[in-house]
Image (tube, rainbow, N blue to C red):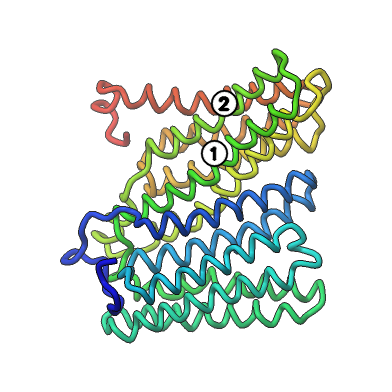
């Protein structure tokens, strides 16, 4: 520890910004979310239906937003003193408590889940108040964030004493306020845009966390089946899907949205980047569940409709989200790549619609093929001769 007791400091801005990497504390903090994502994915495995998918999304959003809150604070104000470490430690406890309460998170454990989320947001409010006290130039932003997140935290807190369905209505209201708070502070963000190298790395690390669920799914699925040709092929295709979307995402990742916003004085691109990552990581996490369900299905029996829709719909959601990121220049700006991503999503939906009666290996093979085409297209377009011919690459 370099600073035993130091006030928060501004880590961004053209005059103070230096190359940054994720700290050891941030990486340790991420471990709690590995468990939380695994737990919410387990819930979906137990109920592959529309209601199960809705429950998965409802529980996933607060988990992701908790991570986002701590990440954005550290991106701007991290000082690694003892107070910051202790506050992050408390946030880890709240995230762990959320993970513990996920299994029956929409039932008997929902009050505990709400209380854990509310406490985590309250700690974030304390962090922003502390930053505002010591950094006057950031006070308008920190005050707006502290007020908005505090209101949301209180709503989540009181939701624990309300019965269902009012409890979930309050959850919805609380998360809307949480999501809206950064949008209402856009004018205060212009001079305090996130760090251009640190934030893309942090988003990439969370993407790795959810991609890890697909790897775990393959291992779990194969370990519970007898080894035969169809099972092995399905496992290979499952790994290929994860590998392809790792390739597509990280080969196009960069700090472009922050740099563009800084040059143009606009924060809209950064907000598109932030909120579009939600469907992306939801899609990746659900893909892992879909892969495992295919591997656990009888290899010589047609894949059930719900499982076919899960794997095709999840990867289609990933493709659609990446298409938006391409289209608005949030990752590598390229209309051609955006078009391929949109087209890939439509093809996957078509497979879900017309693929009734297909064996599990056939469905996962088609999904892997669509994913591989995205990588092949990127490789083809990245050829030196193509890059010189097309300015949008």
How crowded is the residue under tag 2: few (<14 C-alpha within 10 Å), some, or many (20+)?
many
Secondary structure category for the residue under label 1? helix
Asked where in the image residue 371 lies, by quadrant, the reply is top right
Quarter holding the C terminus is top left
At a point 37% along the width and 43% down the height, the residue shown is 253
Residue 124 % position (x, y): 47, 75
Residue named by callout 1: 319
Of marks 2 and 1, which one's residue comes earlier in the chain?
1
Residue at 34 percent across and 57 percent down: it is 23
Residue furthest out toward the left: 15
Residue sitting at x 23%, y 27% = 388
Q: How many marks?
A: 2
| Left or right of 296, for residue 291 | left
Which of the 4 quarters of the picture holds residue 353? top right
> What percent of the width, then of the height, locates residue 255?
31, 50
Which residue reaches farthest bottom?
133
Residue behind mark 2: 370
Q: Nearer the viewer, residue 120 or 53?
A: 120
Is residue 260 visible in the rendered image? The answer is no
| Category of crowding for the residue at label 1, using alpha-carbon neighbours closer than 10 angstroms: few (below 14), some (14–19), many (at least 20) | many
Q: Percent position (x, y) of residue 38? A: 63, 49
């Amino acid at each position: 520890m370099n600073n035993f007791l130091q006030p928060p400091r501004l880590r961004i801005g053209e005059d103070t910004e230096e190359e940054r990497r994720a700290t050891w504390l941030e990486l340790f903090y991420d471990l709690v979310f590995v468990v939380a994502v695994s737990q919410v994915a387990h819930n979906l495995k137990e109920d592959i239906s529309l209601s199960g998918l809705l429950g998965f999304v409802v529980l996933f959003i607060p988990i992701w937003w908790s991570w986002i809150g701590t990440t954005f604070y550290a991106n701007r104000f991290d000082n690694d003193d003892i107070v910051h470490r202790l506050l992050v430690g408390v946030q880890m406890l709240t995230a762990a408590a959320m993970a513990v309460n996920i299994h029956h998170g929409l039932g008997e454990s929902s009050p505990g889940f709400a209380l854990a989320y509310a406490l985590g947001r309250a700690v974030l409010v304390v962090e922003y108040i502390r930053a505002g006290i010591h950094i006057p130039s950031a006070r308008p932003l920190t005050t707006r964030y502290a007020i908005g997140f505090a209101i949301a935290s209180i709503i989540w807190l009181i939701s624990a004493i309300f019965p269902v369905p009012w409890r979930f209505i309050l959850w919805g209201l609380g998360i809307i306020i949480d999501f809206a708070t950064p949008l209402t502070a856009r004018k205060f963000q212009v001079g305090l845009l996130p760090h251009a190298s640190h934030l893309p790395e942090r988003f990439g690390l969370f993407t790795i966390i959810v991609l890890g669920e697909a790897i775990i799914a393959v291992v779990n699925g194969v370990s519970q089946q007898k080894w035969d040709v169809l099972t092995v092929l399905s496992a290979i295709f499952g790994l290929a899907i994860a590998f392809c979307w790792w390739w597509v995402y990280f080969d196009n990742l960069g700090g472009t949205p922050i740099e563009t916003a800084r040059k143009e004085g606009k924060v809209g691109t950064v907000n598109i980047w932030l909120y579009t990552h939600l469907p992306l990581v939801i899609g990746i996490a659900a893909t892992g569940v879909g892969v495992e369900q295919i591997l656990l299905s009888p290899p010589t029996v047609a894949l059930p409709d719900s499982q076919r829709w899960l794997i095709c719909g999840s990867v289609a959601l990933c493709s659609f989200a990446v298409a938006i990121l391409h289209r608005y220049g949030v990752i590598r700006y390229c209309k051609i790549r955006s078009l391929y991503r949109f087209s890939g999503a439509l093809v996957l939906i078509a497979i879900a619609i017309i693929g009734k009666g297909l064996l599990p290996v056939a469905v996962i093979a088609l999904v892997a093929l669509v994913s591989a085409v995205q990588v092949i297209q990127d490789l083809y377009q990245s050829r030196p001769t193509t890059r010189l011919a097309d300015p949008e690459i």
